[in-house]
Image (cartoon, rainbow, N blue to C red):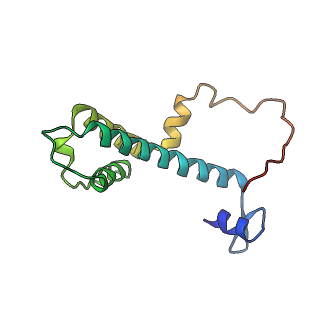
Amino acid sequence: IIKIRSLLKGRSRAEVFGRTIKESAVSRAFTLFFLTLTLCFVAIFLLSITERMPQTPNFGLPTIAFEVFSAFGTVGLTMGLTPYLSVFGKLLIIFLMFIGRVGIMTVAFSLMKNANKQEAGYKYPDETVMIG
């Protein structure tokens, strides 16, 4: 939010309370936010497709979204959907609980092959891209 506010004011750096937030921290925060949002939306999409069976009570999209965000946030709340989920749905909820507890960046870095390597000794030239 601070970076967006700074950009709207025409500043190139994220500044708040007389301090400048490092660009690496801002980049990591944006990455974390969008990875989390993408993971949750994919989980909501998968559950809304796989859990429309005749024996399952008619739970709507808000109930599925609540279950997904609650599982990822390791909150421990439910709207009663979890007992009616299929094996795939329950495994997906378990996966979300694990990712939420361990941390999405930790899991992402552990899955990357060269996460521990340093940056390459070369740098591509900068390019100006028109946005908006």
The quadrant holding residue 50 is: top left
Q: Quadrant of the C terminus?
A: bottom right
- In the displayed structure image, the side of residue 90 where residue 27 appears, left or right: right
> What is the number of callouts on the image?
0
Residue drawn at (76%, 62%) of the image: 13
The image shows residue 79, relative to residue 41, as above or below, that is below
Q: What x and y, as percent, mark residue 43?
A: 38, 42
Residue at 23% x, 54% y is: 78
Q: What percent of the width, then of the height, locates residue 127? A: 84, 43
41 vs 1: above or below:
above
In the rendered image, the quadrant that contains the N terminus is: bottom right
Direction from residue 71 to residue 19 in the image, left or right: right
Q: Residue furthest top?
A: 113
Quick one: which residue is furthest to the right in this view?
125
Q: Residue 19's x, y, as percent? A: 72, 69
Q: At x 64% / y 27%, what residue is drawn?
A: 114
- Furthest residue toward bottom: 17
The answer to whether residue 114 is left or right of residue 107 is right
- Residue at the spot x=54%, y=49% of the render? 34
